Image: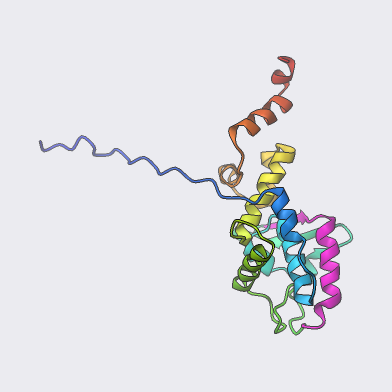
Amino acid sequence: MKANPAKGVSAPKAPRHLPKNIDVDDVNRLLDIDLNDPLAVRDRAMLEVMYGAGLRLSELVGLDIKHLDLDTGEVWVMGKGSKERRLPIGRNAVTWIEHWLDLRGLFASDEEALFLSKLGKRISARNVQKRFAEWGIKQGLNSHVHPHKLRHSFATHMLESSGDLRGVQELLGHANLSTTQIYTHLDFQHLASVYDAAHPRAKRGK
C-alpha cells in the first residue's frame, strides 16, 4: 500500500500535568521560620513576597528598593515581554520587608537591590531556590519547596477564595487565560461549587 492513511494526522498531545501546590496549613508552617539571624529575616521577607504576590523567581530577585511602595503595600515588577505590573503584596509582606530593610545595611554594597546575599550583592535565583528548599526541610514539609511552587500555590489559593480567573491572570502576568488555567490546582468539585455560588441561573435554580 503506497498511500499512508495516517499522513496529515497529528499525534494527540500529551496531557499537561497540573502543577503541585502547597496547602494553606503547610504555607503557614513554612512561613513560621526561626528568625535567629538577619538572613532568616531576609528569607521570611522573600517567602512572604513570593506567596503574597505570586511573583516569578526572576521578578523576585530583580526587585529594587525603588520598586516598593510600602505605604500602599504594592510592588512594581517587570514581567515577561517587558510588561510592567503593579501588585499588592499584603500586610505581612510589608511588615517583613520593613524588618529586612532595618537589617539590610549589615550587608549592603548593592544600593539598588532589595534582597541581598550575605556578600552584599543582589541575591541569585539559585541562592533563593537553595534557601527555600532548606526551609522546607527544616519546617518539616513533605514536598520539596521551590519558588515556582509558591507561585502555583498563590494562584490556587486566590482562585479558591475568589473564583476570579481573570483577576488571577492579571496578578500572575499571564498573556493567555489558558496558562492561568494550567497554573490553578483546583478539582472539578471546587470549580462546580464556585459556579453554583456565582452563576445567576445556578442561583435561581436553587
Task: Name which residue lies at 48% across and 45% down.
Answer: 16
Examine the structure image and report whether residue 88 is included in the region drawn in magenta. Answer: yes
Closer to us: 109 or 80: 109
Res 162 → quadrant:
top right
Task: Name which residue lies at 80% across and 78% down.
Answer: 104
Instruction: Count all numbered tags in the image, as a single digit.
Output: 0
Task: Name which residue lies at 69% across and 55% down.
Answer: 54
177 sits left or right of 42 in the view: left
Residue 3 place in picture, x, y as percent: 15, 36
Residue 159 place in picture, x, y as percent: 69, 41
91 sits left or right of 48 in the view: right
Residue 181 place in picture, x, y as percent: 59, 42
Residue farthest to the top? 205
Of the 4 image quadrants, the one containing the N terminus is top left
33 sits left or right of 128 in the view: right
Residue 202 place in picture, x, y as percent: 69, 20
Residue 63 visible here: yes
Is the residue 165 above or below the residue 72 in the image? above
Residue farthest to the right? 71
Res 56 → quadrant:
bottom right
Residue farthest to the left? 1
Of the 4 image quadrants, the one containing the C terminus is top right
Examine the structure image and report whether residue 90 is included in the region drawn in magenta. Answer: yes
Res 43 → quadrant:
bottom right
Task: Name which residue lies at 66% across and 45% down.
Answer: 156
Residue farthest to the front? 140
Residue 52 visible here: no
Q: Check the image and tell me how it is coloured.
A: rainbow
Q: Give the extent of the magenta segment.
A: 84-107
